[in-house]
Amino acid sequence: MDSIIQSAAAQMDAQKQKKGNAIDAELEALLSEHLGDIADPLSRSMFLAGLSDKAMTGDMPIADFIRQALKLAETEENIIVLEQIAVSLVGAVDMMQRLRPETETELSLLLGEIEQFTLAQAQSAQTPDLQQLWLNTFLDVVASEDGLLSVMALLNGETIVDGIEISPELRWKLLIVLSRQDAEGIDDLLAAEIERDPSDFGQRSLLSARAAKPTLANKEQWVDELQSPEILTSLAKQRAVIAELFPATQTDLQLKVLPKLLSSLPEMSREADAYFLTSYTRDLFTPMCQLESSALMQTALDEFQGQLNPTVLRFLREAHQADVECQLLRVKVNH
């Protein structure tokens, strides 16, 4: 196995010198069989990162990377590598959601497997940190019908993860997940929860849950409120809405609202608080991975020259670049 590590590391270094992908097809095939056999956790971490980079640049299918990560997670014991696996899984699923419909078939096959695996890991983990890690990963990816049934079962106590308290914070997180998918009875559940927890945290969480509902009218209403606040009278409340307004599962709605988001930027650059503008431009222009979204952002950059403050200009440029890169990834996925 040491020879495998040395050979793989040498190949990665050679590829980096050429400014190519650090893992070629031969090394990828080798790692698919032996990644979990490598004794050194730092080496496993390095190769996992290389595979993730390859998937996110379209040089290997994202679905293949997810399968590799799940396979490694079955035997991995190092907490740092496990955290890396969890973050990588969430990022890979997030990207596949953004690349729909091209990734729809693969995602529908994989999502249930990921949900079942992460929830089972939470239930069988031997330490509180690992339980929390896998439960959070489950909640960050869950979107299938069966997965939402599991979320509901956690909320009503039918499913229990030993050692995990269903705290107010966790209850709100479960409700936000359900609201993203417009689960049946969500309005009644939210009304009951805010009676149970009317704290400041509960009020902000309610705003997040309401913003997450996947209808165009709802998104437009909250964008109007962000642009001319009446209810959202504090930065904390504004950020609560922004955080859940456009999850990766709702890029179709995000694209429809994009012209409204962009058209307000010159006026907001003059009048809005800098901290608010940072959240607004950083979190509401996440990649939609479409030619149309990239073109709309480029048009805004061109037409609003001299009208955007440095904060807005910086984050809009970064958003445009990320969207272009994601759109190019979509092209690779199509081929």
Image: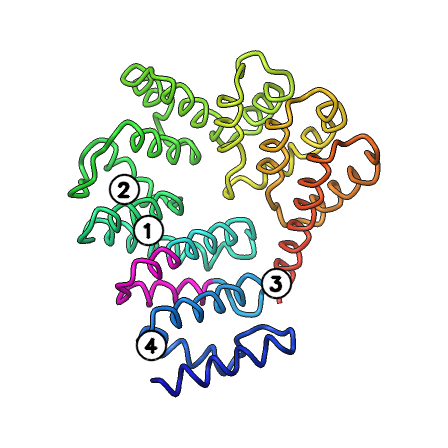
In the rendered image, which residue does mark 4 sit on? Answer: 38
What's the CA distance linking mark 3 and mark 1? 26 Å
Residue 115 badge: 1
> What span is in magenta?
63-85
**Mark sitting earlier along the chain (1/4):** 4
3 or 1: tag closer to the N-terminus: 1
Q: What's under tag 3, amino acid-wise?
A: Asn
Q: CA distance from mark 4 to mark 3?
A: 34 Å
Label 2 near label 1: C-beta < 8 Å? yes
Q: Earlier in the sequence, mark 1 or mark 2?
A: 1
Please tell me whether mark 4 or mark 2 is closer to you in this view: 4
- Say which mark, if any, is on residue 150: 2
Tag in front: 1 or 4: 4
Q: Earlier in the sequence, mark 4 or mark 3?
A: 4
Disc 4 crowd rating (10 Å Cα; few below 14, some 14-19, many 20+) is some
Kind of residue at disc 4: Ile
| Foreground: disc 3 or disc 1 | 1
Q: Position of residue 30 (x, y in %)?
A: 42, 81
Q: CA distance from mark 4 to mark 2?
A: 35 Å
Callout 4 secondary element: loop
Residue type indicated by callout 1: Glu
